[in-house]
Each structure stands twice: as C-alpha cells, then as structure tokens.
Image (tube, helix red, strand yellow):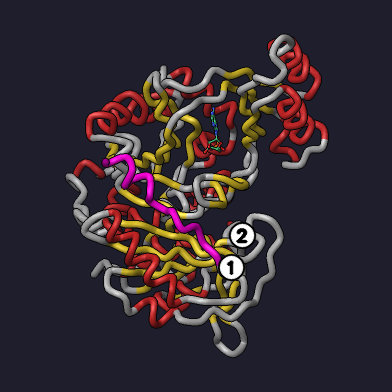
Amino acid sequence: MKVLVVGNGGREHAIAWKISQSPRADRVFVAPGNAGTAKDVENIEIAADNITELVAFAKQNEIGLTVVGPEIPLCNGIVDAFEDAGLKVFGPSRAAAQLEGSKVFCKNVLRAADVPTADFQEFHSAEPAERFINERYSETPDDCPVVIKADGLAAGKGAIVCSTREEALEAIDIIARQKQFGDAGNKMIIEDRLQGIEASILAITDGQTILTLPPAEDHKRAHDGDTGPNTGGMGAYCPTPSIDDKTLRWVESNVLVQTVHVMKRKRNPFRGILYAGMMMTPQGPKVLEYNVRFGDPECQPLLMRLKTDFLDLLEATVDRRLSEIGPLQWDERPSVCVVMASDGYPGKYEKGKIIRGLEEAAAIEDVKVFHAGTRLDDEQNVVTNGGRVLGVTALGDSVATAKLQAYKAIKCIRWDGAWCRKDISDKAITLSR
Ligand code: AMP
Ligand code: GLY
C-alpha cells in the first residue's frame, strides 16, 4: 500500500518511519516533510494546509491511507475532504476536531461527559471578563490563580497562566483587545488554575473501541527545572511513573470512554488520536485540554516503543474494526526524547545552519534521531529550518539508561547555536524513588 503522511515535524517523521517498517507499506510519502523524512521515506512539495492539492495527489497516486499529523488541517476539515473524495484518511472530522479547535466546545463536552476539569466561565469580549476578574479578586489582587485561554487555535500559546490580578487583566488585553492570536481570541475562557503534575494520556479510537497508549510526560518550559517560557515541548519520555496502572484505567473509563460516548451521542463521532492533557491534582486527575492528534514530542518516544504493526493499527481505526487488533504490543524498555533547538527559540532564531554529526549519532545503539525543523540545502547538507530542530530519541533498560543514550547521541550533533534541556525525564527518576 502507498501511504501519505501530512505534516513536517518530528511527530510526522516518527509516524512515517514507523509506518515504513510495516511489510504492507510499499511507499511512504510525507507532505511537505523535512530532511529526515527525505532520507527515510519520500517527500512531496505540498504544504500541510493545502487540502485541495493533497486530495489531488492522493487520488492521482492511488494512496491507500493518509495520516494527518497537525491540528490545523484537521480543524480545517481535511478528513471530510478526503472522505468526500472516497479516500481513506486517519484523523477526526472537522466537527470532532473542535475538541482541540475550540476551548469552549471542549469544556462543554467535558461538562456533558461529567469529566473532571477546572471550573470555567466563557466570555465573548474584554469588558465582562475584566469585570469578572476585578469583582472576584477585588480583595486579593496578588492572589489570582486563573488561566485565561483564547478559544481557538493559537499554536500552543493561547493559554496564559496567571498569579495576580494584573497578570489576568493583561492576559485579557492580549487575547481580546490586542488580538495577538487573531480570531482565536473572539471568545475566551477563564478557568481556575490547577496545581499538580502534568501527564499526556493518548488513546487511539475508531469511535467505538478505545486503546489507551502508555502515559507520557512532556517538558513544555524552555529551561531546566521547568523554568523559562512555554515552548512546543522540549522533550518527553514514556511511560511516566506519575500515572500508575490504576490511575490509567481510571482515566480510561472516566475520561476517555465518557468523552468518546458524548461525541457519539452528539452525532459527532471521534476517530483518531484523542490526547488528554491531564493534571494530577490532590483532588484527582483533571483534564486541562484535549488535542485531536499525536503530541509532539510525545509521539516520538511512544512510537519508538510500539511493536504492533502501525499501519495495521491505523487502517483498522479508519475501517472501524479496532476491536480486531487486540492489546497493543510495546517494547518493555522506556524511551526518552530530547529536543535540540535553535538559539533564540521559542523567540526569534536564525535558520540555515549546517548540522553535523548526524551519522555518528545514528550509529549509537537504540537511538533514532527524528528531524523536525530541518531541510536539505542545494548542496544536500542538512540545515536548520525551525526552532525545534531534532528529537533525539533512545530506548534503555531504565529511564536513566535511555536518557544517557539520548544525551550520548546529542554530544555527536552540532550546529551553530544548538542547545537542549539537560534534565529531560529526571522527574521519572525522582518519582520512582
Ligand atoms: P492548554 O493550551 O490548555 O494545553 O494549556 C497549555 C498549558 O497551560 C498546559 O500544559 C498547562 O501547563 C497550563 N495550563 C492550562 N490550563 C491550566 C489550568 N487550569 N491550571 C494550571 N495550568 C494550566
Ligand atoms: N506536546 C504538546 C502538544 O503536542 O500539544
């Protein structure tokens, strides 16, 4: 079968690499891909949001299955367009993708499904939101633990975590007056700020059967010790000991199953990857948000461990016969993915720096270097082309060994301005003590 993967990040490299291991995958294309996917599979020059051209390519080339990585094409209806053209495609419909595309929609589904989440209020303009904050925190301006979120997609930057009333008012201004996230800020929610440990719990579902994947932990802040600005994710590992089996089963029955049922009852069935961003609070697990796709970088350590044929799994989901797949098979060994980034990320950074040492890194046992922001220049050098550049991923007998292997590979890789966090997965080690 010929397969098309849509996207150009580390997640899509991992998806394409894993699919290409299936004996049933004859050719794997990535649109538009990066230097890593150019090497492992085949790139085609169509942007991930160019739905019309992607449909045309899939038709002309008899693509048997298309797998969509990022949220923007999903929220723009890529799955509906492929299905209308009679093409098989993995991912939720536009209507179901609203779970990620609209925070208000997501919160209403969580409410209807009776899933624990932070209390929230919805606002459609700045004034009532400011009034709410001013009244509720009139006595305690220095203690205002809220999170203010733009309703729509904002490249992971639309949630502003606040501690004081001043910060909350500034966040409202950014979202609803300055419109820094554009139309995504036409609505917003203000919710209680929760305390606890975060975990990413992903499941694959055909709308009927739900298979939960091992829990992972992302590292969203730029610097060691979870300090610095928020990023798309500086590294992840799997499984995380912050979620034991009992908690995972609880989340499966009380969060994932309930949500999938409500979506079905709303005649809006969810198929694809349902990713619950969870906070483990002293009152129990609560959902912070849903994503409707694999997490990036969580996808990289997850797929590094998957032993079940990934193409079979994706196709069974699309064909609504996931119940036939049975329990997923995983490598027992944990995995750690460390993101190498460009100098300046998540702010401004330069592109086009030549990356060296990739072959030496690839030669290290149990290591896979997934590419994110890379491309091939005219001389076929691999050069940087984004903020998050590589996701160096390793397996090990323990989290500590996997971490060591990943950092050993990182030592081989260099470019002008390369950096990474040094503490990815350390929480696993502290938690298991
Ligand atoms: P979201 O875009 O909803 O995933 O939020 C991005 C990040 O903001 C999350 O990963 C959390 O670190 C933080 N966050 C979101 N909602 C809350 C909340 N209610 N309490 C505390 N932190 C939150
Ligand atoms: N790693 C966070 C995300 O993919 O949204």
* Residue 56 seen in this snapshot: no
Determine whether the beta carbon of the residue marked 2 sits less than 8 angstroms from the nearest atom of ligand 2. no
**Side of 255 relative to 82 (left or right):** left
Q: Which mark is residue 50?
A: 2
Residue 186 at x, y percent in the picture: 73, 31
The residue closer to the viewer here, 43 or 161, is 161
Q: Examine the image and state in which quarter residue 251 appears.
A: top left
Q: Range of the magenta residues?
A: 419-433
Q: Examine the image and state in which quarter residue 25 appears.
A: bottom left
Q: Is residue 232 magenta?
A: no
Q: Residue at x 51, y 62 (%)?
A: 420
Q: Are marks 1 and 2 in contact (CB under 8 Å)?
A: yes
Q: Residue at x 50, y 46 (%)?
A: 225
Q: Which mark is residue 195?
A: none
* Disc 1: CA contacts within 10 A as few (<14), some (14-19) or many (>=20): some
* Residue 14 seen in this snapshot: yes
**Side of 110 relative to 325 (left or right):** right
Secondary structure, mark 2, is loop
Disc 2 marks a residue whose amino acid type is Asn
Above/below status of 10 relative to 378:
above
Residue 294 at x, y percent in the picture: 43, 49
Q: Which mark is residue 46?
A: 1
Disc 1 marks a residue whose amino acid type is Ile
Residue 406 at x, y percent in the picture: 37, 65
The residue closer to the viewer here, 342 or 206, is 342
